[in-house]
Amino acid sequence: MTYGNRLREQIAAPGTTPLIGVYDMYSASIAAEHYDGMFVSGFGFAASHYGLPDIGFIAWPDMLAFVQRLRGAFPAHHLLVDIDDGYVDPEVACHMVQSLERAGASGVILEDQKRPRRCGHADGKLVLPLEEYLEKLQLVLATRNDLLVVARTDATEEDDILHRAEALAATDADVVLVDGVRSVEWIERIRGVVGSKPLLFNQIAGGKSPRLSLTELTDLDVDVAIYSTPCLFAAHKAMDTALAELRLADGRLPAAEANMIGVKESTDLLARNITRHHPAAAPQGAAR
């Protein structure tokens, strides 16, 4: 079964499928210990690879190379990839989709923002005319073989949100995402207009959307939940704390503790990225 069809099958199963945002190979190695699905977040990748905010700096060859490395280390995990607006041009979007599918991506998210683009939970977002976006989306859909495609709108006006969600649901896209949804009521309204089409919900700490459990999302008939930044923000806090403590201790490393991460724990984690390729290796990701 192809990677795209494996993810479709997972999404079609009962419950809400969680996909955890990863930003580099180390964060992915940790995420793989807990979940069987990853989301290659544009927010996290822009921060990690460039040290810049998620406002359009990502170059498609860099994202492609990252996905190739991920698939090499995680042969059995779902990989949903944020490709922003397809890197502007429809031709580039189609080339990227073909390249990602060959690299082993499970799916992509294609948004309707126009430049200058913004994080989906930021203010000041602008969207393409609907027909222009639908033309790009249709070209991407015609280009893919089995790759799963999520059609995303960043509309902010109430009437436009529902109009675009309904239009995206009428396409051959596999899943619909309305980013920056502000309330449970709006999840229900969007669910009403997309009909039977699978629905994706994006959660990000400090973002515009409510914090909901997988049980609550299942009750709302949401099929997929992406968690864009839990690894990135946790690493930010942990590193800031560790370095502040190191400075206060005049550069003396803390004493070893039972739950401390040291050389052995780190090496063991990374070694599993090799053993996953052994036929007898047990899968590391936890189901749902």
Image (spheres, rainbow, N blue to C red):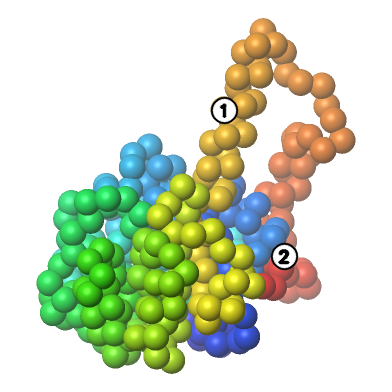
Vertical relation: 284 (above or below) 117: below
Residue 110 in which image quadrant: bottom left
Vertical relation: 207 (above or below) 242: below
Vertical relation: 237 (above or below) 185: above
Q: Is residue 206 left or right of residue 231?
A: left
Residue 182 pos. (x, y %): 40, 62
Q: Nearer the viewer, mark 1 or mark 2?
A: 1
Please tell me whether mark 1 sits on a helix, a strand or a loop.
helix
Q: Amino acid at mark 1?
A: Asp
- Residue visible at 63% across and 56% down? 31
Q: Is residue 34 left or right of residue 196?
A: right
Quick check: can you spot residue 278? Answer: no
Quick check: can you spot residue 198? Answer: yes
Vertical relation: 263 (above or below) 130: above
- Residue visible at 76% across and 47% down? 268
Upstream in sequence: badge 1 or badge 2: 1
Q: Nearer the viewer, residue 200 or 137?
A: 200
Please tell me whether mark 2 sits on a helix, a strand or a loop.
loop
Q: Is disc 1 surrounded by few (<14), some (14 to 19) or many (20+) residues within 10 Å?
A: few
- Residue visible at 43% across and 65% down? 183
Quadrant (top left/top right/bottom left/bottom right) for the C terminus = bottom right
Residue 169 in which image quadrant: bottom left
Q: Which residue is mark 2?
A: 284
Residue 116 pos. (x, y %): 18, 51
Q: Which residue is mark 1?
A: 240
Q: Is residue 7 left or right of residue 271?
A: left
